[in-house]
Structures are given as structure tokens and as C-alpha cells.
Amino acid sequence: MTEADLPAVMAIERATFPLDAWSEGMMRGELADMPRSRHYVVVLVDDEIVAYAGLAAAADQADVQTIAVLEKHQGTGLGSALLTELLGEAVRRGAREIFLEVRADNPRAQAVYRHFGFEDIGTRRRYYDDGTDAIMMRRKLGD
């Protein structure tokens, strides 16, 4: 992902996360840390950005920052492909475990993460702007 991708990325962000979308400034801040501690990628279909994902990594830990797929492309495997890319990058950067937060009211995403070996480790009460809880998840890497 580059700054040139931001108009399309922000449109997906607002469509996918209408209640708690990141601001463009937040996304620019993430890109400013690439490649030092961040890794952001986009998916193109017919030259159109339809999905993106981001990873933060420092020392032996990594965090899935975000994964978003346009609604009409959900269920096609793009989210899984993006998560696979983030997991691979976390391993390449030497992470031994990876964390994420997922909305408690998003069972579809939770199921994908569990399929990839993530386990629930706790709850962040009222984490999202609308008061929804976040389920914290972790997956060990390597070994």
C-alpha cells in the first residue's frame, strides 16, 4: 500500500467499518512507519483496490492492525489470503506470536481467525466507538 492508494482504501474503510473507521490521518501515520514497523498491502481485482490489510511488528510480537474487504468481494477468500500474507510477514520479521482485536458482534471474522489458529485471550469492554466489546485473540508463531 502506498499513499496513492489512500482514496480507495479510505472508501473501503468507511464502507466496511462505518461505526469506527480510521481517519485518513491515522492511515497515513501507519504508512509512515513502513517498512520499519508496519506492513500494509492491497488487493487489486481488475485494477481496482478491493481489499487491504495491515500489520504492526516489533521485537517478537506482531499485531493484525486491520483487514478489510469490500462487501461484494467478501466470502471469496481475499480475507484469508490477506491474513496469510500478514502471518507470513510476522514470521519473516521474527515474531513469535501475533495478536488482534475483533468485534464481539462479528462472528464471521471470529470464525476466520479461529480457523487460522487464533485463540481468545480476553475481552476489551466497550472497545469500539459504539460501545461494542472487542475479543482479544492470539496465535503463537513458529515452533
Image: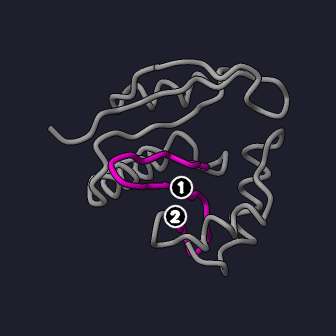
How many other residues sit within 10 Å of disc 2, few (<14), some (14-19) or many (≥20)? Answer: many
Q: Which image quarter is the C terminus in? A: top left
Residue for point 47% across, 64% down: 37
Q: Which mark is residue 118?
A: none
Coloring basis for residues = one colour
Q: Nearer the viewer, residue 1 or 140?
A: 140
Q: Quarter-wise, where is residue 49 in the image? A: bottom right
User: Magenta stretch?
Assistant: 40-68
Residues at circles 1 and 2 in contact by the CB criterion of under 8 Å: yes
Residue tagged 1: 53
Is 10 placed left or right of 66 in the picture? right
Tell me which numbered mark, 1 or 2, is placed earlier along the sequence.
2
Q: Nearer the viewer, residue 7 or 97?
A: 97
Is 35 placed left or right of 88 in the picture? right
Q: Quarter-wise, where is residue 101 in the image? A: top right
Is 139 placed left or right of 19 in the picture? left
Decide whether the magenta segment is chiefly helix, strand or loop. strand
Q: Looking at this rendering, what residue extends furthest in the left direction?
A: 143
Q: Which mark is residue 40?
A: 2
Q: Quarter-wise, where is residue 50 in the image? A: bottom right
Q: Is residue 60 magenta?
A: yes
Three-letter residue code for mark 1: Ala
Q: Looking at this rendering, what residue extends furthest in the front direction?
A: 59
